[in-house]
């Protein structure tokens, strides 16, 4: 259940910025920071595929640890106000984040798990700030602003970004990834969108196949198949 504080802050935010009505769920990641009874929390987005042991992350001594954002691999910065990517040359004297993190995986220590931190994060949920954002980001923008200079960056193998369109995948030079993060559309489970692209002659990324093979094994072990048509389309396309 959403906290009363979150519901109130989000209600105010959406009244002032109704264009975020279909994106408000992305801000639910902020609710993790109110879980003050834990020594450490590993937050994982729903579009991640875990491939190996993540237990070393729980031994990290940092208040917040995360992996670099795509802009890091592209050799770019992000603007402080719009969060849009710019090259170092384009940035000039403009205020920028020289390095930002992707919010799909967060290792949060006890120092950041408290009611005051939660309230402070919600205080940053301001329509006038978000109406300037041109990159389409939501919680990631807020978290990078709030934790600027207070984040420890960890190896990209814990959040290996996957581009199903293969436009920038060659830039993600990560060895032995332990997590694939499917950050663009179509998402792996949107099998009908993937099929449509196949029929248009657009190839799928090999890492989409890994997701579906994992899904097939999960279905085999549990007997769960979800939508029957999607399941069999997945079996046919990614056999």
Image (tube, rainbow, N blue to C red):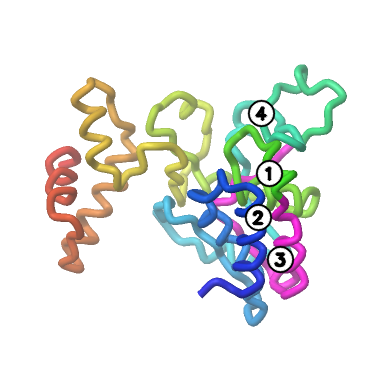
Write down the residue under mark 3: 61
Image quadrant holding the C terminus, namely: top left
* Residue 13: mark: 2
Task: Please report the bounds of the magenta region as a residue range.
Answer: 99-126
Residue 57 highlighted magenta (yes or no): no
| In the image, farthest residue toward the top | 89
Write down the residue under mark 1: 130
Could you tell me which residue is drawn at 26 percent across and 28 percent down?
Answer: 197
- 2 to the left or right of 111: left
Looking at marks 4 and 2 on the same chain, the residue that comes earlier in the sequence is marked by 2
Write down the residue under mark 4: 85
Looking at marks 1 and 2 on the same chain, the residue that comes earlier in the sequence is marked by 2
- 204 to the left or right of 126: left
In contact (CB < 8 Å): disc 3 and disc 4: no
Give the alpha-carbon distance from disc 1 to disc 2, as whole Å.
10 Å
The answer to whether residue 237 is above or below residue 148 is: above
Circle 4 SS class = strand
Give the alpha-carbon distance from disc 3 to disc 4, as whole Å.
30 Å
Could you tell me which residue is drawn at 75 percent across and 60 percent down?
Answer: 123
């Amino acid at each position: 259940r959403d906290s009363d504080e979150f519901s109130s802050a989000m209600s105010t935010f959406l009244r002032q910025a109704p264009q975020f009505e279909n994106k408000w769920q992305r801000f639910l990641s902020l609710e993790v920071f109110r879980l003050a009874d834990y020594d450490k929390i590993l937050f994982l987005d729903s579009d991640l595929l875990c491939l190996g042991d993540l237990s070393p992350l729980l031994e990290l001594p940092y208040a917040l640890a995360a992996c670099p954002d795509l802009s890091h691999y592209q050799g770019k910065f992000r603007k402080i106000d719009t969060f849009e990517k710019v090259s170092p040359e384009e940035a000039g004297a403009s205020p920028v984040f020289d390095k930002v993190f992707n919010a799909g995986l967060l290792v949060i220590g006890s120092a950041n798990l408290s009611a005051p931190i939660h309230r402070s994060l919600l205080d940053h949920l301001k329509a006038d700030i978000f109406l300037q954002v041109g990159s389409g980001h939501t919680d990631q923008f807020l978290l990078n602003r709030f934790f600027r200079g207070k984040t420890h960056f960890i190896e990209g193998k814990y959040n290996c970004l996957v581009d199903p369109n293969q436009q920038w995948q060659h830039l993600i030079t990560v060895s032995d990834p332990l997590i694939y993060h499917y950050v663009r559309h179509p998402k792996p489970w949107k099998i009908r969108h993937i099929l449509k692209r196949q029929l248009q002659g657009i190839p799928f990324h090999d890492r989409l196949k890994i997701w579906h093979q994992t899904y097939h094994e999960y279905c085999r072990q549990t007997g769960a198949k979800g939508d029957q048509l999607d399941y069999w389309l997945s079996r046919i396309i990614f056999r």
